[in-house]
Amino acid sequence: MGTSARRGARRSFADGQTRRPGLGQNAATMKKTLLAALLLGLCLGAAAQTPPPAKPAQTLTPGPSPKGEGRMPANHPPIGGSPHSKEAASPWAEFADYALSIKVPPKGESGNWKIRAFADPADVLVEYDTPAAKGRNRGTVLLVGGQTLAARGTALEPGFELEPLDAAVVSLKILTRLLDAAVPGGPAALKAKQPVSARDDKAPIEAFTPTVSSRFAAPWSLKGTLARVDASTVSFDLEIEAPFGEKGETRARWRFSGTASGSARSRRLEDGMSLAGWSGYSIGPGTSGKTGHASLRFRAAKLPGPFATLKDLRAAAAKGG
């Protein structure tokens, strides 16, 4: 997808370009980060096109707010429309659980996610297993109320603690756009197993959070199958072909497969959820400056633990650590 990432945005190894150091990182660090984040900035298959201009980042203020101030912007958690338009959320974004595998060129490496959405779009749970410079990166992250992040089984990179979350959100947004193209009528229109195909010679497929961008340049084509597993579950196996390389000089294919099930509207995070073994972070406004990293729209400050339950984490976040 896209080529030049927006300032402050980061990209993944799924990028269809030749790697270059950037965003204040050296080549080794950039390669490790991109491999680990798989779809972070998922500039999948990009020709050299500039993404649409970004709106100013929403300012975050500490402490809870009934009107949503101080939370991550509504376009950050899954799945929502583009933050640069007023498009409605995809009907494919209304499931509660997504199991997603993405295989990318040129070597066919794959990343895997289990993403759980909730009635509050500012809550999301992500389990990930993605390629790293050596071996695999595995872990679980939980966004709570758009203000607090919890992590288990992973060491989050200082300054980029939101990367695993953003990787999942962006890949999920791309998936819903592919599903929209495959079956515009949404899940209700899928009655059985059916072959699907779509193409567009002009408009790219793109998605982004405030810190991550992802793009498939046109012309792209899509083919594959979708199937109705049961009343609340669908499966998908889709292959998109799009320009690949620094200037889109060749074409390559990416494969998205998995399942989507349940209804996010019927599920809420419970205070009694066990967080034994988790680390907690409060999310605040990003800082600018030459710190060795790009200017960040958000920062995460570690909270003192341990936390027995989600209620304990919320209490620690409310005290500001």
Image (tube, grey):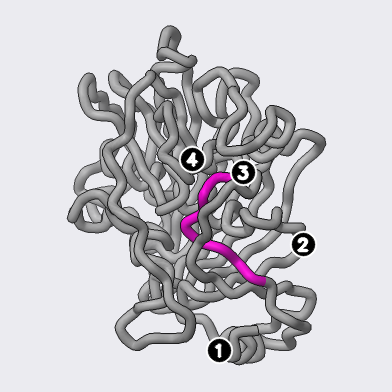
In this rendered view, identify the residue nearer to me: 289 or 263. 289
Per the model, the C-alpha gap separating discs 3 and 1 is 29 Å
Magenta range is: 293-301
Mark 2 residue element: loop
Query: Could you tell me which residue is drawn at 73 percent across and 52 percent down?
Result: 138
Mark 1–mark 2 CB contact (< 8 Å): no
Is residue 171 visible in this depiction of the protein? no
Per the model, the C-alpha gap separating discs 2 and 4 is 23 Å
Task: Give the number of the disc on residue 37.
Answer: 3
Per the model, the C-alpha gap separating discs 4 and 3 is 9 Å
Task: Look at label 2 and name its amino acid.
Answer: Gly
Say which label, 3 or 2, has the lower sequence index: 3
Number of other residues with Cα within 10 Å of mark 2, as a class: few under 14, some 14 to 19, many 20 or more = some
Residue bearing mark 2: 153
Mark 2–mark 4 CB contact (< 8 Å): no
Considering every residue shown, the one lying at the far top of the view is 249
Image location of residue 249, percent across then percent down: 42, 8
Query: Could you tell me which residue is drawn at 31 percent across and 46 percent down?
Result: 54
Mark 4–mark 3 CB contact (< 8 Å): yes
Is 295 covered by the magenta stretch? yes
| Residue 263 higher or lower than 308, as above or below | above
Question: Nearer the observer, disc 2 or disc 4?
Answer: 4
Residue bearing mark 1: 318
Task: Look at label 4 and name its amino acid.
Answer: Gly
Mark 1 residue element: helix
Task: Look at label 3 and name its amino acid.
Answer: Ala
Say which label, 1 or 2, has the lower sequence index: 2
